[in-house]
Amino acid sequence: MTVLLPSGETVPALGMGTWRMAEDPSRRDAEIAALRTGLDLGLTLVDTAEMYGSGASEELVGEALGDRRDEVFLVSKVLPSHASAAGTVRACEASLRRLGTDRLDLYLLHWRGSVPFAETLEGFAALLEAGKIRHWGVSNLDLGDMQELTALSDACQTNQILYNLSRRGPEHDLLPWQVSAGIPVMAYSPVEQGRLLDSPALAAVAARHDATPAQAALAWVLRRPQVCAIPKAGTVEHARENARAVELALTAEDLAELDRAFPPPQGPSPLEML
């Protein structure tokens, strides 16, 4: 299961997120083992950010990847406060040092701040020319922001947003617009940091497929073409559980039951963030 980027490159529809990793030293070995297991299972899109643990997540990812860097589509993000033309370059170079690599496959603006898009795009252009990033994109941008951005450049590869069963607002306008523009969505917190797992409706759907609620929640996100998901897995067992979600095909009955439990939006709503 893959997603096609505007560049023509394909990436796995299911990857691995690293938010909140490297915060507890006692979990470090388990987190590294989980990332390596995910790579073994084909979850080769790995997402991190300079913000996560103030760079500690990037360092952990770098250690986990080791000599497997070339197997991975590696994503990181620049903070809005660093996103001036020169600041974007400096932030990326610092991320590369922490990750122990010479390039990122995708570099994202983490969310919109006070720096004009044009300045951040200037920084992205310098990084592209230097070979330090292969592609760029954005995160947490709502429809109006995306329209403004794409009026400046047609090179945006993705918009990483909060999207899951309990956060369906983007379905009203942002997701349809991105489909029409050919810009994939990268869904973070696709299981709502575990809060969805107590849903009776999700448990019932999962039971019909001999699956777990987490797998059903991931399958729901992945049901849409051009949407990929980046759940975190802090243990080897969790990585294996996530990987099996790509095998789960929800039925029309399943989707209707989940719609009743988690109604789709009836109108526009501001994009939510975690």
Image (cartoon, rainbow, N blue to C red):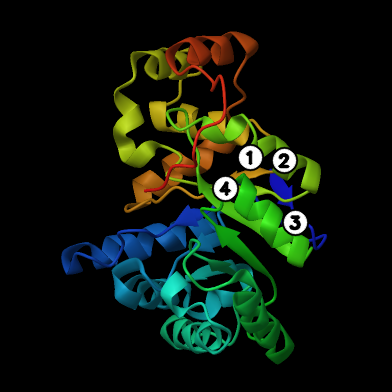
Answer with the quarter of the image where residue 85 lies: bottom right
Q: Position of residue 164 (x, y in %)?
A: 48, 34
**Toward the viewer: 196 or 115?**
115
Q: Is residue 111 above or below residue 216?
A: below
Q: Position of residue 87 (x, y in %)?
A: 50, 86
Q: Label 1 vs label 2: CA separation?
A: 5 Å
**Residue, x 42% and y 44% (percent of image)?**
189
**Pointer 2 residue:** 177
| Residue 42 can be seen in this image | no
| Residue 7 can be seen in this image | yes
**Closer to the N terminus: mark 3 or mark 1?**
3
User: Mark 1: which secondary structure?
Assistant: helix
Q: Which mark is residue 109?
A: none
**Closer to the N terminus: mark 4 or mark 3?**
3
**Closer to the N terminus: mark 1 or mark 4?**
4
**Pointer 4 residue:** 142
**Toward the viewer: 234 or 195?**
195
Query: In the image, what residue type sits under mark 4?
Result: Asp
- Cβ atoms at labels 4 and 3 below 8 Å apart: no
Query: In the image, what residue type sits under mark 1?
Result: Leu
- Cβ atoms at labels 3 and 2 below 8 Å apart: no
Quadrant the N terminus occupies? top right
Circle 1 Cα neighbour tier, 10 Å, few/some/many (<14 / 14–19 / ≥20): many
**Pointer 3 residue:** 5
**Pointer 1 residue:** 174
Answer with the quarter of the image where residue 121 lies: bottom right
